[in-house]
Amino acid sequence: MVFWIASLVGLAVAYLFGSLPTGYLAGKLLKGIDIREHGSRSTGATNVLRTLGKWPALAVLLIDVLKGVAAVVFARWFYLWFSTVLSDTPPTALDLQSAEPWAVCLAGLGVLLGHGRSIWLNFTGGKSAATGLGVLLAMSWPVGVGAVVAFGVALGISRIVSLSSMLAALTAIALVCGLQQPLPYRLLVIAGGLYVILRHHANIRRLLSGTEPRLGQNSR
């Protein structure tokens, strides 16, 4: 019971972290616009770059990454604290080691869902790539760094952010399956990676038709 209560609290808090509409707030505060009515109509950093400029986009990117980091860090801390304080018998290190990854897994799913389906934006939002990176870095830094490298190489070659994001998600899936990682982490990265790719469905159509804009071009 303690595990489920702690995990559900972590899930709810992670969802609220993810729901913070960073790109939307940037549009409202800087230009008084609803960024969902401009460019690709996404609230992510790429659309902020096209609509508001590089410095607002960098700020949105960093905050979105930190949302993922914060969700995992909070889930770990809260699960440990809650289990220690409210359990009838103090949990053993083995118990914590085996159960904590599942709490992290639920929090990771929560923050990704919150970013893509924000309660403050009538359940719309971004594509969760940056927030997913934050989850990866906090959960398993080798997987996160591998995804960053894949993104950077793909972006340098193609200059297409959406393609680079999807390749980074696929790289994370390959790394988490190839490296020695707990089962919950593998399930989270597979589910989260597929979720990020599915959120790019419009981009995939534009890629197939050859109309997906590159960096420096306006979204069509």
Image (cartoon, grey):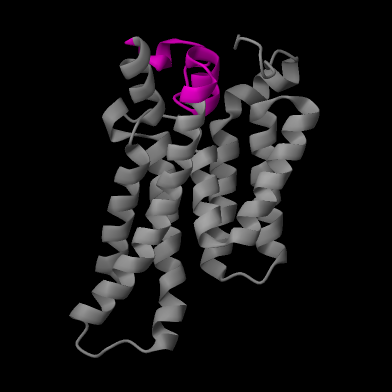
Q: Residue 213: x, y in percent?
A: 67, 15
| Region in magenta | 32-56
The magenta stretch spans residue 45: yes
- What residue appears at the point 48 percent right and 43 percent down from the top-left corner? 65
Question: Most extreme residue toward the right, as rendered?
Answer: 157
Q: Quadrant of the N terminus?
A: bottom left
Q: Does the image show residue 104? A: yes
Q: Quadrant of residue 180?
A: bottom right
* Residue 180 vs residue 53, the one in the foreground: 53
Q: Quadrant of residue 136?
A: bottom right
Q: Residue 149: x, y in percent?
A: 71, 46
Q: Residue 134: x, y in percent?
A: 50, 49
* Residue 21 vs residue 113, the one in the foreground: 21
The magenta stretch spans residue 137: no
Is 217 displayed left or right of 107 in the figure? right
Q: Quadrant of residue 176?
A: bottom right
